[in-house]
Amino acid sequence: MSETMIDPSVIEQDNAAREANLRQDYDSLGERLDRQGIAIDTIKDKVARFGVAIPSWGVGTGGTRFARFPGTGEPRDIFDKLEDCAVIHQMTRSTPTVSLHIPWDKADPNRLKDTANRLGLGFDAMNSNTFSDAKGQANSYKFGSLSHTDAATRQQAIEHNLECIEIGQAIGSKALTVWVGDGSNFPGQAHFTRQFERYLDSMKSVYQGLPNDWRLFTEHKIFEPAFYSTVVQDWGTNYLIAKELGDRAYCLVDLGHHAPNVNIEMIVARLIQFGKLGGFHFNDSKYGDDDLDAGSIDPYRLFLVFNELVDAEQNLDDFRPAHMLDQSHNVTDPIESLMVSACEVLRSYAQGLIVDRKALSGYQDANDALMGSQTLKAAFRTDVEPILAMARMETGGAIDPVAAYRASGYRQKVGEVRPASESGGGGIV
Ligand SMILES: [Mn+2]
């Protein structure tokens, strides 16, 4: 039994007050789903097995380019971050892994592994950072990293990625995610083709260092920090990279890394069809890469993404995408935001599972646009909260994670031992 950050009796007590109502709601939803030929327990079991990774940087308070307003008891290092991640998993039972970011989370690998083991956590994909300069590094990434015009700077970026793999191997990770900030801010600043050739050459060196049982994820982003062009700007370029590199290279889709109104669920479908969807970064946005909480603005879009993911899960033998939350929490307690976001991801998954796919397929073949749409809406309109809550309760989590977390006083307690950080300067993390 792993060590728990919050006394389990706090959860038990909060659950006790809610359990009777939950059972009633669960039975009532079960009857309703039964009429549609769906066994509620089957959905619940699938939900209970679903995991979404927490990014280590997500538990710190974020900010914008303008300012950052620190919260109480912010994690001081990766070990504090792991403890906060353990709280999220204890409450929701759906976030068993943490995705590390190097060099921010650099520490003794044995200590990392021991701490994670003690807290009942594992490690998801490793994330490299060549979009900012680490203290004391020889060459600056101001004008790019893996695609830089200078060979020594490219080599430094390659070696950093290889180091991330090495650290990942020591702690049991099985994937490397590479996102670069490379691009240009002015027309004429960079030669598109030569820049992309340099990037591909560098990535081939990284790929060569990838262990056989690892996967390499590349993540596209339309803008920021480069505002005129980015080297990996869209899913087409991302697909070209994965194709060029080899079988263990896949595309990662981040919901916020597209122009507004882009049909992201269709991108997901295309990448699945050609065997190149590596995973998904969940968040939400209104205008750009806002990094808002998953499902907070457009839960229907999240559902439509899951509609594609569930379709693939049911039709493919080896479909195991890596799912992670990738958000910035600027005005909320990051632990609360991440708990709620994990629940939103699971909600969309559960709703995807109850789509009547046989009927949907029939409407599609018959060109019945209205009923095709209604079939999806029927699943989306179903309140699956009792399924999620029952899955949590039965696995030791909280029926109401935010309420139980607040009752625990965890934030105040860590606030006493973790000194307040200074407010002021901007920064996305
Ligand atoms: Mn991302």
Image (cartoon, rainbow, N blue to C red):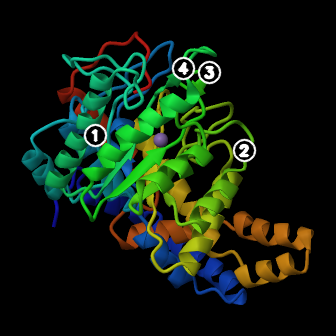
Q: Please give the label number shown on residue 349.
A: none
Say which amino acid is labelled 2: Val
Q: Mark 2 = which residue? A: 262
First of labels 1, 2 by sequence position: 1
SS at badge 3: loop
Asked if marks 4 and 3 touch (Cβ < 8 Å), the reply is no
First of labels 4, 2 by sequence position: 4
Does residue 333 appear in this view? no
Query: Which image quarter holds the N terminus?
Result: bottom left
Q: Mark 4 = which residue? A: 190
First of labels 3, 2 by sequence position: 3
First of labels 4, 3 by sequence position: 4
On screen, residue 114 above or below 231: below
Badge nearest the viewer, 3 or 2? 3
| Residue 367, image x, y percentages | 91, 75
Say which amino acid is labelled 3: Tyr
Alpha carbons under labels 1 and 2: distance apart: 30 Å
Alpha carbons under labels 3 and 2: distance apart: 19 Å
> Residue at image x 18%, y 35%?
106
Q: Mark 3 = which residue? A: 228
Q: Nearer the viewer, residue 248 or 345?
A: 248
Alpha carbons under labels 4 and 3: distance apart: 10 Å
Q: Would residue 22 appear left or right of 396 to someone viewing this image?
A: right
Residue lying farthest to the top in this orientation: 424
First of labels 3, 1 by sequence position: 1
Q: Please give the label number shown on residue 161.
A: 1
Alpha carbons under labels 4 and 2: distance apart: 26 Å
> Residue at image x 69%, y 75%?
355
SS at badge 2: loop
SS at badge 4: loop
